[in-house]
Image (cartoon, rainbow, N blue to C red):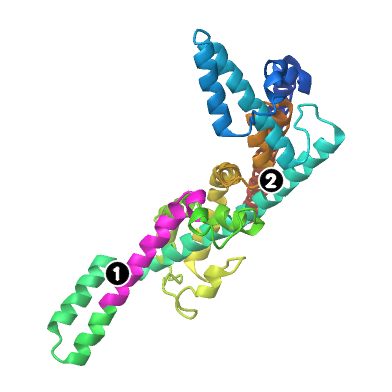
């Protein structure tokens, strides 16, 4: 554990030093340095008959330059590019009600820190919700698959019974069973497509009903979009299947441990035990399977956390959620504010590293507890 902790701390120190060196090599620019070519366009901004904010006027300016000075096409392009740059910067400064500067003062640092804390809170909440969802749906699917017939076999059996039925009432019963099963499989397919859909597709599908600045919307999209929930549910389910085939499970079944996989409190596993936060299956062989898999999945949880934090970054950027960390990151990348970009990236890196440290600590405590139990039993 101490070796892993040292490795994490060394990586944090290394990245911190690397970012600091980059900051030193590429120092912050002042507004004058950043727009040193403003004198090139100053005379055009002072013309009363020319409105640079108008695309039509800028097009007329280009045509006039090409007519009166056709030899200097490259200089005309540079002039118009500088006008675009000037207008974009002025528009951003007006919309955000502040000067966009690479120089980081105390107010800007506090603003970035508050955004980072908000992002971390959303990340932790979504991680916990998705972990619960991954675990719960994987357990539900595993228990269900232990006794349920496959869809095609079930449909084939129902279709055969429908063909063999003689009276109208029986035929109607089996017909509606087939109709219901078909409807469920279609609904399942739609849900699967939604879970795999990118966040912006889901968001813009409901853009007339939701505010894209909504914190709740971002949390919902973080949970259900980008394939995170269904991808890691499948991985957890694979762990369960693999664990259920190990020798100790077969031995326990031979020794008459409860091994009935049906949704029944008396003779199987109840739905309430699957959906509760602290899952326990006392007296059932699945309790040991679940405990072992939950421990095995912890290392995969670090992968899930990295996947999630990438998804949240994409959501904030794709939906232009203003006032959030990754929107700020996108804007500062656009305006080449390297100092702000480095601080935000280092903050996100710290969140990822802290997640890994917490998970490694939990694994260490669990391993030590198992070691103590084994020592007591052997003693």
In the displayed image of the protein, which residue is found farthest to the right? 106
Numbered mark located on residue 149 in the image: 1
Figure quadrant of the N terminus: top right
The foreground one among 118 and 82 is: 82
The foreground one among 88 and 350 is: 88
Task: Determine whether the residue tagged by mark 1 lies in a helix, strand or loop.
Answer: loop
Residue drawn where x is 70% and y is 19% of the image:
43
Residue drawn where x is 53% and y is 71% of the image:
283
Residue drawn where x is 70% and y is 25% of the image:
45
Residue 331 visible somewhere in the drawing: yes
Dominant SS of magenta comes to helix
Q: Is 2 on the left-hand or right-hand side of 180? A: right
Please check the rendered image and state whether residue 195 is part of the magenta-colored stretch, yes or no. Answer: yes
Q: CA distance from mark 1 to mark 2?
A: 48 Å
Q: Position of residue 145 (x, y in %)?
A: 37, 65
Q: Position of residue 350 (x, y in %)?
A: 70, 37
Query: In which image quadrant can residue 30 be found?
Result: top right
Task: Determine whether the residue tagged by mark 2 lies in a helix, strand or loop.
Answer: loop
Numbered mark located on residue 324 in the image: 2
Q: Position of residue 184 (x, y in %)?
A: 35, 70
Residue drawn where x is 53% and y is 49% of the image:
297
Tell me which segment is drawn in magenta.
Answer: 178-202
Numbered mark located on residue 123 in the image: none
């Amino acid at each position: 554990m101490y070796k892993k902790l040292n490795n994490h701390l060394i990586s944090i120190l290394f990245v911190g030093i690397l970012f600091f060196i980059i900051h030193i090599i590429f120092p912050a620019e002042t507004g004058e340095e950043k727009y040193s070519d403003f004198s090139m366009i100053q005379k055009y901004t002072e013309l009363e008959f020319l409105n640079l904010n108008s695309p039509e006027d800028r097009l007329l300016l280009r045509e006039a330059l090409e007519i009166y000075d056709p030899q200097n096409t490259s200089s005309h392009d540079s002039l118009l590019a500088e006008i675009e740059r000037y207008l974009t910067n002025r528009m951003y400064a007006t919309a955000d009600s502040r000067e966009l500067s690479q120089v980081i003062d105390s107010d800007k640092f506090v603003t970035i820190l508050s955004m980072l804390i908000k992002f971390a809170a959303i990340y932790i909440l979504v991680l916990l919700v998705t972990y619960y969802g991954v675990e719960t749906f994987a357990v539900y699917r595993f228990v269900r698959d232990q006794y349920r017939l496959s869809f095609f076999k079930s449909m084939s059996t129902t279709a055969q019974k429908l063909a063999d039925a003689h009276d109208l009432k029986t035929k109607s019963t089996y017909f509606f069973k087939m109709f219901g099963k078909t409807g469920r499989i279609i609904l399942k397919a739609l849900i699967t497509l939604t879970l795999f859909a990118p966040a912006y597709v889901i968001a813009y599908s409901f853009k007339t009903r939701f505010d894209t600045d909504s914190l709740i919307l971002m949390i919902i999209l973080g949970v259900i979009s980008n394939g995170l929930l269904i991808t890691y549910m499948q991985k957890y389910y694979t762990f369960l299947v693999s664990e259920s085939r190990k020798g100790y499970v077969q031995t326990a079944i031979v020794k008459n441990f409860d091994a009935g996989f049906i949704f029944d409190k008396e003779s199987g596993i109840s739905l309430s035990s699957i959906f509760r936060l602290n899952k326990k299956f006392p007296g059932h062989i699945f309790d040991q399977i679940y405990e072992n898999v939950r421990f095995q999945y912890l290392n995969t949880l670090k992968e899930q956390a990295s996947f999630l934090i990438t998804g949240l970054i994409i959501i904030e950027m794709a939906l232009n959620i203003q006032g959030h960390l990754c929107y700020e990151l996108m804007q500062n990348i656009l305006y080449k504010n390297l100092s702000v970009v480095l601080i935000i990236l280092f903050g996100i890196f710290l969140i990822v590293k802290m997640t890994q440290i917490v998970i490694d600590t939990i694994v260490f405590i669990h391993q030590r507890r198992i070691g103590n139990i084994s020592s007591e039993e052997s003693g």
